[in-house]
Structures are given as structure tokens and as C-alpha cells.
Image (tube, rainbow, N blue to C red):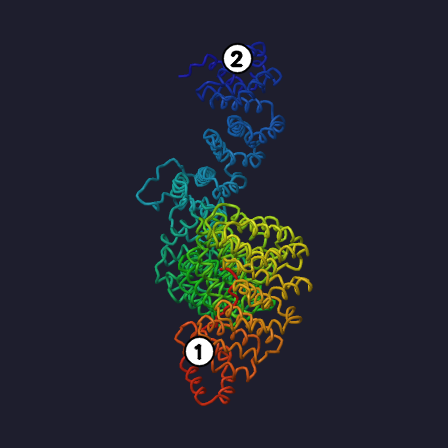
Amino acid sequence: MVHCPFYNTFIFILRYSEYPDRKPWLMSDLDPYIEKLIPGLKQSLLDPVPEVRTVSAKALGAMVRGIGGAKFDELLKWLMDTLKSEANSVDRSGAAQGLAEVIGGLGQKELNRLMPGIIQTAERVDIPPFVRDGYIMLYIYLPSVFKDDFMEYIGPIIPSILQALADESEYVRETALLAGQRIINLYADQSIELLLPELEKGLFDDNWRIRYSSVQLLGDLLYRISGVTGKMTTETAHDDDNFGTETSGKAILKALGKERRARVLAGLYMGRSDTALLVRQSALHVWKIIVAHTPQTLREILGTLFTLLLGCLASTSHDKRQVAARTLGDLVKKLGERVLPEIIPILEHGLDSDQADQRQGVCIGLTEIMASTSRDHVAVYAESLIPTVRKALIDPLPAVRDAAAHTFENLHANIGPRALDEILPYLLSKLDDDDLAERALDGLRQVMTVKSYVVLPYLIPQLTATPVNTKALSFLSSVAGETLTKYLIKILPALLSSLSKKWDTPEEAQEMEYCKRVVLSVKDDTGVRIIITELLSASSQKQEDLCWAAITVLHQFCEHTDVDYSDYMVQLFRGLIALFIRKNNKILLASWECLSAVTKKIEATEMLQYIADVRQAVKYAVSDMEGKELPGFSIPKKGITPVLPIFREGILSGTQELKEQAAVGLGELIDVTNAEALKVSVLNITGPLIRILGDRFVWSLKVAVLDTLTKLLTKVGVMLKPFLPQLQTTFLKALNDPQRSVRLKAASALGQLIIIHVRVDPLFTELLNGIKNATETGVRDTMLQALRFCLTGAGSKMAEPLKKQASSSLLSMLGSQEETTRSAASACLGAMCGSLSDVDLTDVMISHLLDSDPSQDWMVKHGQGIALGVALKESADKLCKQFEDSITKTVLDLTTSDRIPLCLCGYRCLGYLLIYQQSKGQLKTELLTSLIKGMKNDSNDVKQLVTQIIPHLSSGGNLTGDHVKLLIPPLVMGTKEKNTVVKTNSEIAVVAVLHLRKDETVLKSVSGSLDAGMRESLNELVYKSLVKLCKQPESALESIDDTVLK
């Protein structure tokens, strides 16, 4: 029962308005009471009872039609405001219903004026949902008011209805659904043309809510057309229990036409497999009501259904692909495998489509069909399927090729090796076709992506056979995964063979890029091990092009891979540095760049652990090297920069033990690197070394650093000029160190430093003052040695007054009671002779070094002899021009002395004199005879010295036959001495004199001139003892100068 106080009044108004003859009288009587009725109208329009709202709205419409709209302006404004009310949907519904009646009362003209604004507002997304809801409610009531006059607006309002069907607010979606149902109920025939196309699109919308509403509205439309009700229940045990009739089916066919009916039913059938539960339930409900026989209907719409399926299968939307796949599987299951003869031709035809998504859909469709069909049936249709897959794998569109690969995967699962035998050779053959090569290669790549463990064993023999297809290997390896590792042993030699053939050709860079892709695709530990070991092994080949190829590929791998290969660092260091002895510049550069790439991957904190490994690798390389410098470290502007950071980090951050190892290792590197290549690293080497000497560290570390700096000064002294002040201060400080070894290394370093000094006098003055003020013999001796080295290096730069001061000080120490001081001071004086003026030199020589006064103390004579020996060693040419005869007499006198130290001095001087004469080609036989007499001396020390001097004579040039004949007998006799040192030195001297390491030419020429006994002794010595000695590495000649402190 309705409890609205105005309800009866509005019923009365409605009834009287239905009679035209009473209407004018009624409206004129109501005119005075309009203002009193309006509050009641408002109240009734918002009544919760729908019937009250309907009666009130119709009464309002009748009054507007009878009286006109002028009296209702305020009410019209109120209706528009209430239409947008946030309060509740009842208020908005009443306002919409009342507004629709008012517009109906005002006529078609008013509708035409207001509709554009209503449609525009309903389509807006930037307004609150309750506002959209109110405007869409007008779509429910305006059609009922205007009937056919509203038909022209059905098309324009449908987009806003569909948009609202997907709204996030449920009440908006419900309103839109009611609006759609109202349009369908009122305009069923017109809806087929206007609404149905939009509903068809809605069935495949990405938004599931739109799909759900589209199914509901489509159901309402089909119910209306077929004359059935959709309110019955369709819950049965099986999805294909249908309730449709032949009559309803014919009605739908007549109304929609064959093509549109097929599209609608196909979309509806796909909805049964929707990802959203509500869509599936709704679609199944509609299908059961309107379809009489599912299998028959499916056969009728099969072509259209597949067209839709193919498009959806290739869609970028995950939901669409899933729906299509489910539908396809369901279709095969429902129709049975007997439907394949009908389906497969449709799919084959689809592959010829101009639309890429359909071609992609064909592949996905075939995949789903094979997944839902028995192997036997797939095998039956293999003849049709194989060409289809082939064609799809070389399709112009990558997405189609990708989908075809999955089809191939399913085909192989069903028919086995036949798929490989009939598809892969076809793709390989297309690699030679310029137009199809790229597609075929990508097709192979896609197949590898899904089935690498099966495809790779088939392809590798084909691709690695000559000529090697590195391009294909590079593309396929990127998707092979860990399967590739099994075949690296075959792939790597093929790559290297191909790359080596492109050495120094325009194709080299491209070929390298292909090889790089292959090795960079390896990510597993086993694969990394194989790559590094195999490439290092190949790099040791003597064949230069293969060696270069292996190192270049290894470089690309080490530089660009993101896998950790730290476990192979030692192996890499040894293998790469071993290549630094090669002579080919391109191999050297490739090895250098590879080593640089390896060391750049090492974190600073990890570098310390590799110091010993790099040193060991350098030693191995040097042991196999001809010459003194490693070519790989002697590349201009590159040098030792790859490994320098390791040693630098050790010097700066390592423990004291590691600092020492790093300093020694750096010195070893300097030894084997030429000066030009070292220049680029001078600053990075010197700074850290100077810093170490400035701190308090153990003496052994200081020795190592000083030794390395000395080597650096020897190689690239001029480059160290910026560090000269720091180095001089550091070296002078070290010269006073308590440790003798530190002082000796500092002395050597000063001897090299002074060579690059411009102003040497201050340094000489400081050394002379240090010698004068030294209280400890050891410190004084090392300072004397430093002075000697400086005199040798830069004595000529010394000012004359300073020379006189120095010579005076040294002469005063010639007879020192301390043997070491006497020896060091005398050696200094001998070294200084080369830089003295002729006047001062004559004075020193006549007054001191050549003084034969027999009354002189033997210690003074000893000092004079030492000085004379060093002078002959350093400046023999200058001395012999003026004093050769006097020198010869003095030397021979010393060799006959009874005192062993003097005798040794004499033979040492004689040795230097003979070496000088040999260098000039003026070796005097009488002096050589005097030297040989030493072999009969009672002192083993004298014999030892003589045997040390003879190899020096031999190394200076080939001795004449007479000289050799003179030397051999005493040396052979020396090999029979009991003293081991004399015996060994005699053997070494024989080898040197006869040049036995070279050949036996000298031996054979000398043997004939010897007497039988000596010839027999010599041959016995050579073939029993010296043959073994000759096979040993030749050691450096032993110095005969015993004045250098060690």
C-alpha cells in the first residue's frame, strides 16, 4: 500500500489528462495551485517506492504539457541538481525519471537542445561516478518517454553506455546495464544495426566487466529476437545440455543474417572459455538458451570462429590469448579429432593472410590443436603440418616466427626426429638465400629457444663444417643456454679457423663480432672453463693466424662477459704473458690487450693475491725468451700498464711482506721492458716507491725499493727529473741507514741519479763531508762506494777545485789500515782518473800509482795497485796513451810480488790491460804469457783469478790460433787441479776459448798443433766433461773487480 499524501492527486491528474476534452479545464484549475503542488512533487519523486516515482514523474510531465514549462523553472533546476546528488541512487533515479518526463512535456525541440550536453557529460571520466550515474539514468527513461522519436540518439549514446559498463563503481555499471536492456527492449530491430556491432566489440574487450555486460546485453537482444525468456535456470550436469529450439535458431538467423549470426555465436562460444568466471557463466547461460545443438552449430560457424580465434591467439592481451587457446582446445575435444580435416585447411589458408596477427594466430592455433590431439592423428596430418611450420618459420614478422617455434616444439613432441629432418635442412638451405637468410636464421634461433637440447646436436655438425657459418652460430648460441657447453669443443676450433682466415681482411671485424656473440652466450662454470683452457691452448700454437684468433676471441670474452672467471686468473696470467715473447706485432698487441682486459676486471682489494702469480708468469716467459726484454711489455706507449696496478696496489696497501714482493716484482718487470715502453708508467711507478722509503719499514723492503728505483733510473733516468729532489734526499738518507744492504743499494741509486743531475757539486760535497765525518767504518765505506759510482757517472761535471779536494782526500786513504776502506778509497781514486785533467792525472799517476819505491809500505802499494786496476777498467784508453809502458812495467812487477794481495792486484791490472788490448786488436803475446804464468802460482786465489780473466778475453773477440794454442795447455792442466773452484773455472775457460757452445771448429783447428799427449788430454776433457757443460745455460761472466762492496 502506497503512503504518499499526493499519490491520489497525481493519479487524478494523470487520469483527467488522458481525456483531451477535460484537459484544458483541468490545467486551468490547477494553475493557481502549482506552487503548492511543487513541494509534493519533489517529495514524491524521491519516494523509495518505484511506483510512486513513476506516477509523480508522469503527472509532472502531463502538467508541463498542459501548462507549459515557465511555471516549472525552479523545479527543473532542482531536478538537474538532484540528478547529480551524491545522497543515493533512489534520488538520482527519481530526478532522472522526472526530468525525462519534463523534457517529454517540452517536446522534441527541447530534447534536441539538451541531448548533446547529456551525452557529453555521460562520457566524461573526470567527474564523480554519481554524476555519471545520474546522467546515464536518463538513458533508461528518455526512450520510454519519446519512443520512436528517440531512435536517432541510440547510436550516439551507446559508447557512453559501454564505457559505463566498465566503470569501477558497481552502481554505475548496473545503471548502464539497465539502460542497455531498455534500449534492446524498446528498439530490438534497430538495436541489431546500432547496438549489436558495439556488443560484438565488447565481447573481446580487454576489460572483463565490459565483456560481462556485453554478454548480458547480447543475451537480452537474442532472447528478444528469438522470443524466449532468459530467466530460466540452465544449471545442468553438462555444459552442452541445450535448451534452445530450432524455431528460435531460425528467428535469430533471419534477424541477423548468416554472417552476423556466425560472428555473434562465435564470440559467445569463446566467452564460455573466458578468464573471468562471471563472463564464463553468463556466456554459457545464453548459449544454452539460444543454441539447440552445440556440435552442429559449431560446424556451421567454424570458419568464422577460427578467424576470430586466430586474431585472439596473436593478440598482445594475455587474456585474449588464453581465451582463444582454451576455446581451441575445447573445440577439438568437443568435435573430436575427426574435425581436423576441416580445421587444418582453415589454418593453412590463414597463413596466407595479409594480417600478421592472423598468421601468428595460425601457429598458436596449431600448437593448441597438437596439444589436444593424439600423436597418431598429428602424424596423419604431418604432411600438411610440416610445410605450414616451415613457411611460418620464415615469415616476415618476428612474432609469427616466434609462435612458429612453439608449433615446431609440439610437432617434434608428436612426430619426433621427422620434424628435425624435414624442417631444419629447409631452414639451413634458406641461409644461402639473400632475401630469406635473415628470416631463416631467426627461425632457427626461435626453434633453438624452445628446443635447444634437440636442435643443437643436429645443427652443430652442419654449421661447423667448412665453410664455417659463424653468423648462424652466433645467433643460435645466444639462445642455446647451457646446452651449448657440450659442443664448445667442436665450436671453438671452427670459430678460430674461420676467424684466422679473415685475418687482415675487411671481413675481420664482422667475423670477430660473430665469434664474440658465441663465447659471450656461455654462462655456466663448465663452459667458462672450456673457453679459457681451449683458447689458451690454441694460442700456444706456432701458427700465427690461429694464435691471433684465439687471443682475440679470449680478449672479447674476458672484457665483455659478466660471468666470474676469477678461478682462472693464474692460468690467464701464465698463458697470456707467455705470449709476450712472440715476434708478430699483431699477436703481441692482442695478448697485451687481453691481459689489460683481464686485470681491469680485478677489484683493488683482490689484486694483492695475484702479485706472486704475475711474477711467476713473467719468470716463465723470460726463461723461454731470446734477449733481455719481453716484446709484449716493450710495446711503445703501452708497456707494463696491464699489470702495474697489481704491483702498485701491493706497494700501497699490502702488508710489509707483500710490499716487498711487489717492489721486487716491479723491478723484474723493469728489467724486461725497454725504456721507450716504460715512459708511460714512470709517474705511477715512482710515486709509491718514494712514499715507501719515506716511512719506517723493514730494511729488506727498503732494499727492494731502492733496487727497483735504481733499475728505473738506469732505464729512463731523464723521465725521473721531476722527482730528482725527493730522490736525492731519500737516497742520501738511506746512505746513513744502519743496515749495510740498504746503504749499498742507496750508493748504486745515487750513481744512477747523478747522471741526470745538472748541478752535481752539492751532491759531491755532501758525499765528501759524509766520508770525512763518518765515525763508523761501514758507513764510510758505503759512502766511498757511492762517491765512486757518482764519479763514474758524472765525474766530468765536477768542478776542478772539488776534484782536487776529492783526490787529496782519497790519496790520504790509499794506505788505510782498514782493508775495506783502503779498497773503497783506492777504487774511488781509480774511477776518478778518467775525469782528471791531464796535469792532475800525470801528477797522480807519476807520484802515486806508478811509484815503484821499494821502501813504501805494502798497504800503500796495495792501494795504488787497486786504484791502477780500476783506472784501467774505467779509463784504459786515456791512461795507455800516455803511460802504457810504465803501466806495463808496474803491473808485471806487482804480479811477481810475494804478497798475495799485491800479486792479485797485479794480475787484475794485467787482466784489464789485456782486455783493453784485445778490444783494440793489439793483444800482446808476452803479456798473455805473463798471465798464463799465474796458473803455476802456488796460490789458488791467483789461479782462480787467471781462469776468470781468460773468458773475458775470449768474449772480446776471437783469439788468434797462437793465442789459443798458448792458453789451452795450462787450462787443461788447471782442470786437473784439486781445488774445485780452480778446476771449474778452468773448464769454463776452455769452453770459452774454444767456443764449444757454438761448434767444434776452433777445437779441430787447435788440436792439430798440439802434441799428442796434450791433444789426447784435451779430447778426453771435451768429450767426457765439457759436452755436458756446453748443454747447460750460459751464465754471465764473473766480474774480476773485487772492489765493489756487496
Residue lying farthest to the left in this orientation:
237
Percent position of residue 959, x then y: 56, 80
Residue 1028 seen anywhere in this rendered image of the structure:
yes
In this view, 641 is above or below 215:
below
Q: Nearer the viewer, residue 312 or 843?
A: 843
In this view, 941 is above or below 777:
below
Identify which amino acid the numbered label 2 is placed on.
Pro
Estimate how packed mark 1 is, as few (under 14), some (14 to 19) or many (20 or more) residues with alpha carbons within 10 Å. many
Identify which amino acid the numbered label 1 is placed on.
Gly
Q: Which mark is residue 891?
A: none
Quarter occupied by residue 276: top left
Q: How far apart are the two marked residues, 1 and 2, measured between alpha carbons?
A: 145 Å
Pick the quarter of the image with the N terminus.
top left
Name which of mark 1 and mark 2 comes first in the sequence: 2
Left or right position of 230 against 806: left
Percent position of residue 366, x then y: 43, 57
Quarter occupied by residue 888: bottom right
Percent position of residue 969, x then y: 47, 82
In this view, 997 is above or below 56:
below
Q: Nearer the viewer, residue 512 or 329?
A: 512
Quarter occupied by residue 632: bottom right
Q: Secondary structure at mark 2?
A: helix
Q: Nearer the viewer, residue 159 or 125?
A: 125
Q: Secondary structure at mark 1?
A: helix
In this view, 1 is above or below 837:
above
Q: Which mark is residue 974?
A: 1
For label 2, the residue is 39
Q: Residue at x 37, y 48 (%)?
A: 293
Percent position of residue 825, x then y: 56, 59
Left or right position of 339 against 891: left
Estimate how packed mark 2 is, as few (under 14), some (14 to 19) or many (20 or more) residues with alpha carbons within 10 Å. few
Tell me whether the residue at label 1 lies in contact with that at label 2, contact meaning CB atoms closer than 8 angstroms.
Answer: no
